Amino acid sequence: MGKQVTIVGGGVIGLCCAYYLQKAGHDVTVIERGGITNGTSFGNAGYVSPSHFIPLASPGIVAKGLGWMLSSSSPFYIKPRLDAGLIRWGLTFWKSANEKTMKQNIPPLNNMLHLSRELTSQIKQDLGNHFRMAEDGCFMMYKSAATEKHELELAKDAARLGIETRVLSPAEVQDMEPDVEINIKGAVIYPIDCHLHPGDFMTTMKNHLEKVGVKLQLNTEVTGFEKNGRTIKSVVTNKGKFDCDELVFASGSWLPILASQLGIHMILQAGKGYSVTYPDMKKNLRRPAILVDNRVAMTPMGKDLRMGGTMEISGINSRILIKRVESIYKAAKSYYPNLDISFPSTDKIWSGLRPLSPDGLPYVGRHDKYDNLIVAGGHAMLGVSLAAGTGKLVEEIVGEKKTSIDIAAFDVQRYG
Ligand SMILES: Cc1cc2nc3c(=O)[nH]c(=O)nc-3n(C[C@H](O)[C@H](O)[C@H](O)COP(=O)(O)OP(=O)(O)OC[C@H]3O[C@@H](n4cnc5c(N)ncnc54)[C@H](O)[C@@H]3O)c2cc1C
């Protein structure tokens, strides 16, 4: 018999959990403060990318990040503030950003990326490709010799993990992108990567879940919980109480706020990023590309083009720092000189909050303070890439099954 599972958060993680839980026969309710119409899971770059096997906390990132912090147009920014959560996050990130931890974290991240990549294709088969999924790889483009060296080393690491890459000259890339001019030193392509329109993916999921009987309790804010010893009996909201056999936290950047209501400290910070979408491009890119020197993501989504980037750790807010958006725009124009895009008005700039764990691995698993609490969060810049895999793992945890991959590295209590 299925269980009554309540999921808090209707982002890509919450919806993918609901997808697999419903399939397995559980009675699922998703409680979401908004309407599942916008938010971080909608305006992102839409990559499903096994190429991103290096966790965010890696050697060199601290020094690089400190340098970037001095420039208002850099891809990375931490707003210094006296906040206990930020200080704990910063210290844990700093401790994790070493060779040994990174090497430990690559295999589990790689496993989950591959699981999720495969499952995302299966979702496309099951629901139909209503979300512009294109399975034709992603370029890592570079302009400087230093970035080239770094990308070639990464390609060797990828080969050691069995991930295919090809190093391309500017002329080869230009041949593959005949409609736009390219100005680069070279690129590495990861053919296994794919991309989709994340907003369309969310809408497809939402429609499907409604159709198969998942209860989407929208415009409803979770404000507390009712407990009986080690069991969470119900979720309290501004629209009444919802009973649960199992509770899943999939609340993105708000995970620490929710967890604290159950006396649990989760180390997580929001990492803001921006994107701008140009509809109906006459001459569009054929493939997505990361402009590595500037950490900018370019994604063709059918006829539309989205550019995005920056990582601002400045708390939970939607303030737009226009200089950083200018940097994204300038990078796009410098890699694609004749791309027909203009600098957007402020109302066309989207921002979203990546839920950043301090080591770059998600939190997926049970919390042993309670008998029925599962956490699925902290997916950072990989929420779309890891959503299907996370959903499947959560379904397996709820069903007390052997998980498809070892989840020890995603332990939700690894920082106490
Ligand atoms: C610019 C940018 C580009 C990105 N590009 C990519 C990419 O190409 N590929 C990729 O894999 N990832 C990418 N990401 C990251 C990805 O978008 C996130 O990792 C992912 O969307 C996080 O999903 P989530 O479901 O955990 O959180 P969210 O989408 O934030 O969902 C959490 C939900 O919980 C709800 N919630 C919170 N608290 C409560 C409460 N108390 N009551 C009710 N509801 C609540 C919120 O309203 C929210 O809707 C990008 C992010 C940004 C900003």
Image (spheres, rainbow, N blue to C red):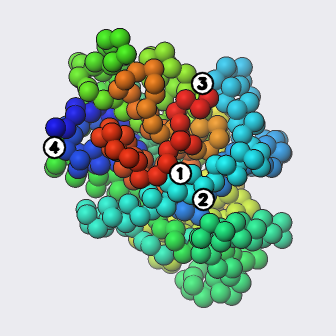
Ligand 1 within 8 A of label 1's CB?
yes
- The residue singled out by tag 1 in the image is 382
**How would you rate the neighbour count of disc 3 (Cα within 10 Å): few for under 14, some for 14-19, many for 20 or more?**
few
Mark 2, ligand 1, within 8 Å: the answer is yes
Secondary element under disc 2, as helix, strand or loop, is loop
Which amino acid type is marked by label 3?
Answer: Gly
Give the amino acid at mark 4: Gly
Q: Which mark is residue 52?
A: 2
Label 2 crowd bin: few (<14), some (14–19), many (20+), radius 10 Å: some
Above or below residue 242? Residue 277 is below
Do tag 1 and tag 3 residues touch (Cβ < 8 Å)? no
Tag 1 or tag 4, which sits nearer the N-term?
Answer: 4
Q: Residues within 10 Å of mark 1 (few under 14, many from 20)?
A: many
Q: Are marks 3 and 4 in contact (CB under 8 Å)?
A: no
Image coordinates for residue 286, horizontal then vertical, percent: 51, 77
Q: Mark 3 or mark 1, which is nearer the start of the sequence? A: 1
Q: Quadrant of the N terminus?
A: top left
Where is residue 398 drawn, in percent x and y?
32, 38
Which residue type carries mark 1?
A: Leu
Q: Secondary structure at mark 4?
A: loop
Who's the residue at 68% across and 82% down the image?
168
Which disc, if any, is residue 48? Answer: none
Q: Amino acid at mark 2?
A: His
Note whether 369 is above or below 16 in the view shown: above
What residue is shown with label 3?
416
Disc 2 + disc 1, Cβ < 8 Å = yes
Name the residue that disc number 4 marks.
213
